[in-house]
Amino acid sequence: MKARQHPSEPARLAALRAYDVLDTPRESDFDEIVLLASRICEVPISVVNLIDEDRQWFKAETGLGVRETPLETSLCAHVILENDFVEIPDTLADARMSDNPLCLADPGLRFYAGALLKSKGGYPIGTLCVLDNQPRTLSALQREALQVLANQVVTQLDLRAVIANEKVLRSEIDHRVKNSLQSVGAFVSLERSAADDEDTRASLGRVERQIRTVAALHDHLGYAGNEEAIGLGPYLSQVVDLLNSTVLNDISVEGGFEDRQVTPREASLVATIINELVANATKHSFEQSSGTISLTGQRMANSVYRITSGDDAAPRAPQESKSSKRDGLGLRILAATVRQLGGSMTVTNDEQGYSTQIDLRFAGA
């Protein structure tokens, strides 16, 4: 007997499709659930079954070997019309399934138990079901476990949807940030061109270069955010290359960084640190706008990653030093970013010049 249509079929289908999960590749989170359900219930077949308009599609399955079958032969299409949990000890003794070719086959599907998968709106989108080729019943513990696992399927679907929505939102935010940076950069460029005073043009030029640097880093970090883990050494070397393309022509940035794996968030924070170190040195160390900024990254004992920054600007007497100007927004941004990574920062200004040492600890350390 073919199952009748759900009374709220359009809304039910909309709830299913909102998950954007149909026809996606297998995922271990769901595969592990069906394997566990099969073992707990001691049956050969277990399926995460999503009921589409004209088919049933399996997000995960064990014991079947297919990803979808027609809706006409679906056992779960009957179950989504019922209560939260349905158990059929012998399918041939059930009027809804006694003429189903999947049950009449040899060997056929003679036992069925399924727990509904419900959307947040309460619509049944499918089941987590277990099947056997011979009649049987589940114990109370097995029924409870199957329901708990079904709840975990829904949790995974909800989490998957949240992550997908966050990616869309992040993409939209990235697009808007990029457009905003371009607009601000264009405005600053026009103001610099129209300025009569050389000092004003020089100041606006520094701002314009800083905007270009931030825009380039933003694009680079957006790409890196698609990875689960990032090699910090090669990544920071690329950041240095970006900075070299945006600082003044007669200032060069050199970097040598030992590698270690970090998350995209950690990488973005370290890139911010590198950017601020270079920006501060460019602004405060080079009176004649020429020289070299040197950066290193080293793996130390006790899971510490140490970043050092220095430059070859000529040392100045304390009264001539611009170090007091360094205690501004740039240094506050630098200190705040270091704190986010649970790190510490030491700044030295002596006859050897101005240098910064930053010790960081990453979550995976």
Image (cartoon, rainbow, N blue to C red):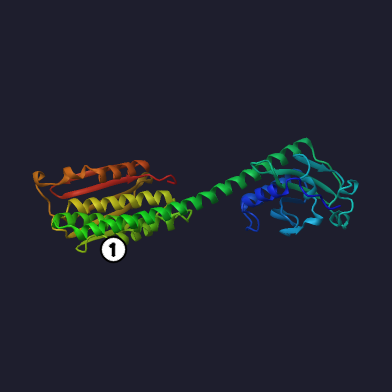
Residue 122, image x, y percentages: 68, 41
Residue closer to the observer: 256 or 78? 78
Residue 94, image x, y percentages: 88, 46
Q: Residues within 10 Å of mark 1 (few under 14, many from 20)?
A: some
The answer to whether residue 274 shows anywhere in this view is yes
- Relative placement, left or right, of 1 versus 297 is right
Residue 318, image x, y percentages: 10, 44
Total residue callouts: 1
At numbered mark 1, what does the secondary structure look like: helix, strand or loop? loop
Residue position for label 1: 245
Q: Quadrant of residue 184?
A: bottom left
Residue 69, image x, y percentages: 76, 58
The answer to whether residue 262 shows anywhere in this view is no
- Relative placement, left or right, of 183 versus 132 is left
- Mark 1 is on which residue type? Ser
Does residue 344 sit above or below 216 in this rendering?
A: above
| Residue occupying image coordinates x 12% and y 51% | 315
| Residue occupying image coordinates x 42% and y 49% | 265
- Relative placement, left or right, of 106 versus 221 is right
- Relative placement, left or right, of 261 versus 25 is left
In the image as oriented, which residue stretches furthest toward the top?
A: 140
| Residue occupying image coordinates x 72% and y 43% | 116
Q: Quadrant of residue 287?
A: bottom left
